[in-house]
Image (spheres, coloured by chain):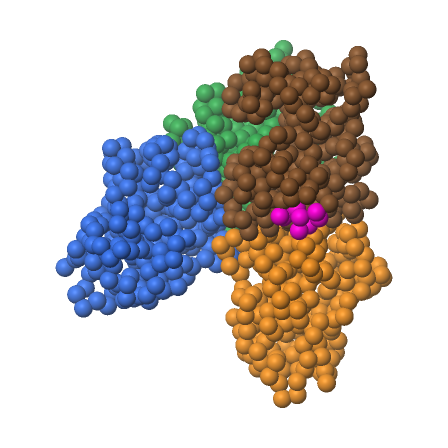
Chain colours: A orange, B brown, C blue, D green
């Protein structure tokens, strides 16, 4: 029987501003990337999200971002090497301490939004990001875009790399994601997402926007909490004729 | 020969907004309370301040605050027990991780501004604050107002308490500080501060606003970095006829 | 036939953080209080909300707040007279200019959250608030709690006062609102809100928590956009057997 | 006798974070660009800066910025056309209202930091910026980089353009400023700045980094408030053997 990790960005609410529907998603995922307060997530939402992750036995990663609450971390902020490094160190440290205080252990780091993309394709940003993680804890795993330049850099730096694919996003022939701004970049139906889930989890393949089938070997599949179909897709992943076990990577 | 700890709030600059003159103060103090990003201090200023503290062999404490950059943490923000607790845990965790990553160790916690006062005299806030520290690391020492209700609560909770006095603030007959808003609340001359320094460090006494001498037994004396006389006062503490050693508490 | 104004706080979303369901509410109300960026509302959400208000022919008020995005303006921030005054002037000015630029006119001011309560019962805060409005435009109307000390102060200052009641909140025998923290403070059913609507609009009376009927003469009824029943309540107000016209105050 | 306008960015302090030394600069300048709260400046500092400008009879402009307090507006933030437009409208409106409330009149707009550069050389950003100003008040003048593409776009849009040069920055042969990151980008001595002042004000020329003399026709010269020599330079401009009158553009 196949198995795969499903991860989701959670804990992104800020004060009275509620983002996503974390409670509906927790039962179906095996890993969660918890916001660190820079694009969303305030201390109390972070604390409560950690507690829920521990209750649901969901593996915990930190989800650092550019400092950009107003843009939800989706805008690239040009930081110096020193600024970015300190910023990532601060966020990871905050999460490590809070997770530990509640009896858990922070296992991996996944960058958020624009920072995710900056490091996926920017060698300089990637190295800055990794130097930050290394100074905090070189045993942390790094979750990032499967097949990206970042994967290679991370592995060369000696980190365990968790290759990530996407349950609800459409791929292009070169293995990259269709940009969010383009129509069709997010899969429109539960069925499409489930087909992508099965195809990636069982065959290591994905069907691209052009209809081509390409190799897509991943360790973890991301579903976006702000996808209105997220809950239905996740439920469906647990009700397949040929079950695929959702479980986290052993770290 | 007498000896005493001198602590100062440092690392409070935010981006291009420079607060205080940390470089001038580091050579003369034995402990520094580093801002955690909530009233001042951004990740890079925090990182750089930690590096300087390590270079100057100055003991490092975390200086958590109400989340209030606009008010520099000097305004009381009414937070729920859960909010305050999570907020303190987040800030301390961020500092612990960053200090550790640079080869140091965070030794104590001193609350900032309005939070300092809230916990000094508010039993509920004090307990919330201490429960946060306890969940993160019960071996951390707590620096707070000497003789305040907080001192007793902290010690009952099993924490090491560092009794704090003030080098540059005027005391009232009941041992409390003259409120900042009142004229004369900050000592006007280097000489007055030095007299207070000698009196507290050598005799455990302080002369109050009314001229009375009262007992003031403290482990650490605070000087405010934004006091324009700070550098001169600190230099003078190192040039006394009868030297008083400035050294940090062994923690 | 009776008529009454219904107002709602709108435009409170911040970046990707969506607050309330403004589009569903606009068709049923006659006045909207638009966030000014201090507790919610960023420039683009403000701009878009003004456009929608103009499209729906809904009267526009500014909804200034304490500067408190993290607390959604529901926490009292202790500001000096000068700070509060400047803060209110800034927010109102921003709204006036943006409304005017889109061909509309800002007609009234309603304070938000903790500021609403501060000025309703605090004479000092009320005077500061009114002095700010007066310096910007003394012809603006002020919407505030019916029967509060603020009503009298406002009228003495020469402002037009719009007396506000609440569609979905439970009253106490002295005419004050049951505090939000208490169970039952928000009416639980559409039916209860509609009964309160009819009772206030037609008879100038409201039934309190104890069952007593008290006088409640108001010019405008507020419904909270974050009330999950808001849309259903508003629809029901338009489908009464004995219609009550929803229309804004002529200002 | 020659005359020229000298402008300075003022009112950029935020809460307890003091930026620049406005009081020392006001007596020597003829125009001030007042921060609008997005890169610096909070309502009270804005209000007080307006009052001082009126006392010193200094012409008032608004100084809108990208929303970036942490980066002091010196980092480019990628905003959509709609976001940038609304953001500029909001900031200008806030200033217009506050200036008017104190008996003054806002006369011109100068973008700050990264936004200044974005619009100086980016046609798209320039048009967005100008469309924002146009919707608020098409009679406002625009102060921007002399000889930049922005100058032409602004004039084509029908705005009065105030050509700006720099008192304390070094120019390159093509008339652009030496980038801040490069050594020598800021003139090192009072004498150099004064020479540049005289050369631009009297001859419409400037000597570049390479020693070449190029034409530099400007209406206003900017001095940076955070230049430690600012006060000395400004004093010196008032003590020339052949006096140059410092006076604002008639708008």
Question: Where, quadrant-wise, is the N terminus of chain B in this rendering?
Answer: top right
Question: Where, quadrant-wise, is the C terminus of chain B in this rendering?
Answer: top right
Choose top left, top right, bottom left or bottom right for residue D140. Answer: top left
Magenta segment, which residues? B131-138
| Residue C167, image x, y percentages | 29, 57
Q: Nearer the viewer, residue C186 or A227?
A: C186
Choose top left, top right, bottom left or bottom right for residue C245. Answer: bottom left
Q: Nearer the viewer, residue C61 or D89?
A: C61
Q: Nearer the viewer, residue D71 or C239?
A: C239
| Residue A8, image x, y percentages | 63, 67
Furthest-front residue in this view: B156
Is residue C15 rendered to the left or right of residue B5?
A: left
Residue at image x 32%, y 65%?
A: C189
Number of numbered discs visible in the structure rendering: 0
Is residue D105 rendered to the left or right of residue C151?
A: right
| Residue C212, image x, y percentages | 22, 54
Q: Nearer the viewer, residue B192 or D151?
A: B192
Residue at image x 82%, y 44%?
A: B103
Q: Is residue B4 above or below residue A117?
A: above
Q: Is residue B194 magenta?
A: no
| Residue B83, image x, y percentages | 55, 50
Furthest-bottom residue in this view: A241
Res. D141 in view: no
**Which secondary structure type mostly characterizes the magenta part of the structure?**
helix
Residue at image x 58%, y 24%?
A: B175
């Amino acid at each position: 029987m196949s198995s795969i990790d499903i991860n989701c960005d959670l804990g992104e609410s800020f004060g009275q501003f509620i983002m996503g529907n974390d409670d509906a998603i927790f039962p179906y995922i095996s890993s969660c990337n918890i916001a660190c307060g820079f694009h969303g997530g305030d201390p109390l939402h972070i604390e409560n999200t950690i507690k829920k992750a521990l209750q649901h036995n969901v593996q915990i990663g930190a989800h650092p971002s550019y400092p950009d609450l107003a843009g939800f971390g989706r805008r690239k902020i040009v930081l110096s090497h020193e600024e970015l490094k300190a910023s990532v160190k601060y966020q990871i440290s905050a999460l490590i301490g809070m997770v530990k205080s509640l009896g858990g252990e922070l296992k991996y780091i996944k960058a958020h939004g624009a920072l995710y993309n900056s490091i996926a394709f920017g060698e300089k940003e990637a190295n800055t990001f990794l130097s930050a993680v290394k100074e905090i804890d070189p045993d942390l795993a790094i979750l990032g875009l499967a097949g990206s330049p970042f994967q290679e850099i991370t592995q060369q730096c000696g980190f365990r790399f968790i290759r990530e694919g996407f349950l609800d996003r459409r791929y292009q022939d070169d293995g990259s994601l269709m940009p969010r701004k383009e129509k069709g970049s997010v899969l429109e139906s539960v069925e499409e997402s489930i087909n992508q889930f099965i195809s990636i989890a069982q065959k290591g393949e994905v069907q691209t926007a052009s209809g081509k089938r390409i190799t897509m070997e991943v360790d973890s599949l991301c579903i976006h909490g702000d996808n209105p179909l997220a809950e239905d897709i996740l439920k469906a992943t647990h009700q397949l004729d040929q079950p695929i076990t959702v479980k986290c990577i052993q770290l």
